[in-house]
């Protein structure tokens, strides 16, 4: 017979002699102001306050407006996408803007999944990324199909770059269709 009880036995917490050291480790130590300062100041502005009553399209447009302010604040989008600590701090602060929805999502897609991936694979040395670093164009990421969800290893759709017409996608069968659209700019 198994008895259910609400009594939980947890091990005792370790004694922490130096709270300052723990704080330094958790909050980026001597680099705290560089890593968190500009994001803290940015999201404290009235521009980032919740706006009740907006529809989905208006909220999406606002998220991209905020992304442009993030880009302007960062000053160098490639440096941001290439600095894991600065990027993680951006996500920490973006997550609290307007319930953690749109800005955090579009920043993750643009700086992590899109721009970060391009920089990791040859980046600005082999292609002109200025439209994306200046946010004249916004990066997208799509990894889902009807039969496969986000199981990237099972995806069947392929994409090829045609220098004249752009990206050409090939979906071999109906169940391999993509089930969502890229994020609109």
Image (tube, rainbow, N blue to C red):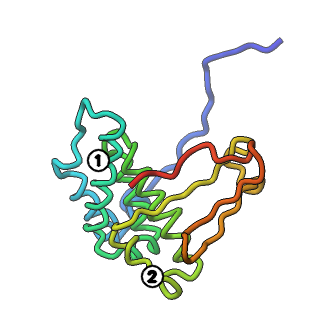
- Image quarter of residue 86: bottom left
Report the residue marked by disc 1.
62
Is residue 79 positioned above or below 6 on the image? below
**Is residue 175 toward the left or the right of residue 76 in the image?**
right
Instruction: Tell me which residue sits at (55%, 70%) in the image.
Output: 165
**Is residue 150 toward the left or the right of residue 132 in the image?**
right
Q: Position of residue 13 (x, y in %)?
A: 53, 43
Is residue 145 positioned above or below 21 on the image? above
Instruction: Tell me which residue sits at (45%, 65%) in the image.
Output: 111
Q: Secondary structure at mark 2?
A: loop
Report the residue marked by disc 2.
128
Residue pushed farthest left?
A: 46
Q: Position of residue 151 (x, y in %)?
A: 72, 50
- Image quarter of residue 74: bottom left
The mark that comes first in sequence, 2 or 1, is 1
Instruction: Tell me which residue sits at (70%, 61%) in the image.
Output: 158
Q: Nearer the viewer, residue 56 or 2?
A: 56
The dot on residue 14 is: none
Q: Nearer the viewer, residue 28 or 71?
A: 71
């Amino acid at each position: 017979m198994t008895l259910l009880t609400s009594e939980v036995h947890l091990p005792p917490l370790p004694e922490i002699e130096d709270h300052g050291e723990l704080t330094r480790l958790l909050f980026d130590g001597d680099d705290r102001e560089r890593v968190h300062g500009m994001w803290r100041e940015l999201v404290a502005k009235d521009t980032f306050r919740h706006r009740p009553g907006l529809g989905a399209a208006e909220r999406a447009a606002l998220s991209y407006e905020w992304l442009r302010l993030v880009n302007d604040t960062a000053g160098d989008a490639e440096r941001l996408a290439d600095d894991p600590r600065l990027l993680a701090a951006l996500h920490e602060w973006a997550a609290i803007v307007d319930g953690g929805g749109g800005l955090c999502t579009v920043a993750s897609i643009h700086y992590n999944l899109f721009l970060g991936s391009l920089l990791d694979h040859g980046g600005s040395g082999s292609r002109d990324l200025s439209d994306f670093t200046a946010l004249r164009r916004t990066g997208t990421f799509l990894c889902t199909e009807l039969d496969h969800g986000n199981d990237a290893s099972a995806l069947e759709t392929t994409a090829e770059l045609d220098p004249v017409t752009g990206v050409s996608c090939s979906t071999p069968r109906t169940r391999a269709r993509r089930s969502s659209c890229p994020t609109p700019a």
